[in-house]
Image (tube, rainbow, N blue to C red):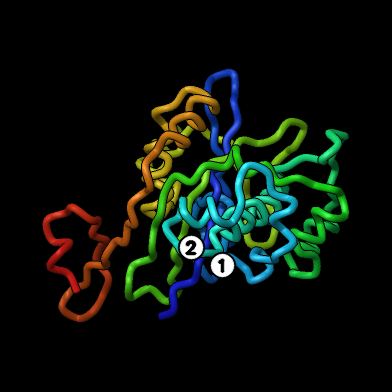
Amino acid sequence: MPIRPAATVLLVHDDPEGLEVLMLRRATKAAFAGGMYVFPGGRVDPGDGDMEIESFCEGLDDCAASARLGIDQGGLSYWVAAVRETFEEAGVIVGRRRDGSHLELSAEERRAVHAGELSMAQLCRRHDLVLDLGRVPYVAHWVTPRGEIRRFDTRFFLAAVPGNQDALHDEMETVESRWLRPASALAEMAAGSFMMLPPTIASLEWLSTFDDVESALDAARALPSPPRIEPKLRFDDVGNVTGVAMPGEADYDELD
């Protein structure tokens, strides 16, 4: 199966009891990860690489973004996709007006971006919007195992919710939104009330080591280039999936 480029965002804010992360539950009938709790994210669209978008990006250009991801070009489109998907799925835009005035985007604009009727470049031009990519560090790189019907090469990013913005699921691809302490989400998974994919679990385990947003952002900026992690599926003798092997596990290298 072709591997599609994708971007996912660990969207965080500070709560009186500590750092919380936004978790969205995907619709049961969703084509990918149906019924599971995920972070906002999705595939990189062609419009995310619009040449005009770079003029609305602050803190990062395509050359620096590509170098950070270890690719020749087009790296900035992953960050733009991360911002776009966060707007589409959570209603939060990681950006601000260039003149510092109050930013308020409409539900109709959110729907239009989701439908592909309004590009991020057009949205930025309409509101003179600056995407604050300097505060969206790259933290992980996961690839869907071979054998899955849909495969994604996904870059994970960390971002804080800008002030005066509220997150809410889109009622289409996602049907529930919850702010949770990472440790609480992991506890709910252990109790059987949360279904999550391995990259989500690993991200929560990493986030659970931080008490607040700034310490998480500081640590994320200091990370070396994240390794490419591609789990492998375990199968029984008749071809049924029995589990997932992670790099470093005893049978990982032996699996096809």
Residue 221 in percent (x, y) is at 47, 36
Instruction: Determine crowd level at label 1: few under 14, some 14-19, many 20+ residues with C-alpha closer than 10 A.
Output: few
Q: Residue 203 lies in what quarter of the image?
A: top left
Alpha-carbon distance for marks 1 and 2? 7 Å
- Looking at the image, residue 135 sits to the left or right of residue 111; the answer is left
Task: Determine the residue positioned at 72% across, 58% down.
Answer: 53
Pick whichever, 98 or 169, lies toward us. 98
Secondary structure, mark 2, is: loop
Could you tell me which residue is drawn at 53 percent across and 57 percent down?
7
Whether pointer 1 and pointer 2 mark residues with C-beta atoms closer than 8 Å, the reply is yes
Q: Assign the N terminus to one quadrant of the image.
A: bottom left
Please provide percent x and percent y for residue 110. Answer: 78, 56
- What x and y, as percent, mark residue 67? 47, 54
Residue 158 vertical position relative to residue 196 in the rendered view, above or below: above
In the image shown, does 119 or 168 lie closer to the viewer? 119
Residue that badge 1 annotates: 30
Q: Secondary structure at mark 1?
A: loop
Question: Label 2 crowding class (10 Å Cα cut-off): few <14, some 14-19, many 20+?
Answer: some
Residue placed at 42% from the left, 57% from the top?
Answer: 70
Is 76 placed left or right of 131 in the picture? left
Mark 2 residue type: Ala
Q: Amino acid at mark 1?
A: Ala
157 and 182: which is toward the camera:
157
x and y, in percent, of residue 178 in the image: 59, 40
**Residue annotated with mark 2:** 33
Q: Quadrant where the C terminus lies?
A: bottom left
